[in-house]
């Protein structure tokens, strides 16, 4: 059982890793900082995923394996669109402050039968413990094993 994350901020990743280890010790996790790699991974591993956690806005080019990596214009919406093309298999938790883009992510997923919830990050990383963990627990408690 996996919890899969699209999150490009290393500090958010670290906070989420810490809370997943404490709150969900029976789950493995996978983090991706860009949409193209995450989509390729999901094309193979989606059946193993118990919860998808998606950010919308992702960072620009960065150094990967000593070279500049250009993730293209990929964002959380690209992942949501690909996921929406698949049979619903797990809940999706969106964590993004982008109030313009998130409704589209939610709409495309819900229109194809996916269960979706959203949390809005606030106060640096405080939201991870205060709202993200609770939302993740609620979604996992209703997920079909």
Image (cartoon, rainbow, N blue to C red):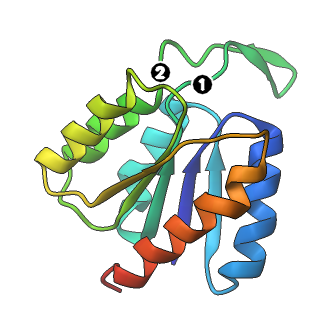
Question: In the rendering, at what x and y percent does residue 74 appear?
Answer: 47, 21
Compare residues 37 and 22 and report the one nearer the observer.
22
Q: Judge left or right: residue 13 versus residue 49.
A: right
Question: In the rendering, at what x and y percent does residue 81 appear?
Answer: 27, 35
- Do callouts 2 and 1 mark residues in contact (Cβ within 8 Å)? yes
Residue depth check, mark 2 versus mark 1: number of the one nearer the observer: 1
Mark closest to the chain's N terminus, 2 or 1: 1
Which residue does the numbered mark 2 point to in the structure image? 74
Question: In the rendering, at what x and y percent does residue 96 appear?
Answer: 53, 36
Quadrant location of residue 79?
A: top left
Quadrant location of residue 7?
A: top right
Quadrant location of residue 120?
A: top right
**Who's the residue at 33% across and 67% down the image?**
90
**Does residue 116 sit above or below 102 in this rendering?**
below
**Who's the residue at 70% across and 71% down the image?**
20
- Assign the C terminus to one quadrant of the image: bottom left
**Does residue 81 sit above or below 58 in this rendering?**
below
Tell me the number on the disc at residue 90. none
| Mark 2 surroundings: few (<14), some (14-19) or many (≥20) residues within 10 A | some
Q: Judge left or right: residue 33 versus residue 63.
A: left
Which residue does the numbered mark 1 point to in the structure image? 58
Compare residues 14 and 2 and report the one nearer the observer.
14
């Amino acid at each position: 059982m996996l919890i899969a994350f699209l999150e490009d901020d290393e500090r958010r990743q670290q906070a989420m890793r810490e809370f997943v280890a404490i709150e969900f010790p029976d789950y493995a996790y996978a983090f991706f900082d860009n949409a193209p790699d995450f989509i390729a991974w999901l094309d193979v591993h989606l059946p193993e995923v118990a919860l998808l956690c998606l950010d919308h806005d992702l960072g620009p080019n960065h150094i990967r394996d000593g070279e500049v990596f250009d993730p293209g214009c990929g964002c959380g919406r690209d992942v949501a669109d690909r996921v929406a093309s698949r049979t619903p298999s797990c809940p999706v938790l969106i964590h993004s402050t982008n109030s313009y883009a998130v409704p589209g992510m939610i709409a495309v997923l819900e229109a194809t039968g996916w269960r979706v919830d959203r949390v809005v990050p606030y106060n640096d990383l405080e939201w991870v413990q205060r709202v993200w963990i609770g939302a993740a627990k609620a979604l996992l408690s209703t997920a079909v094993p």
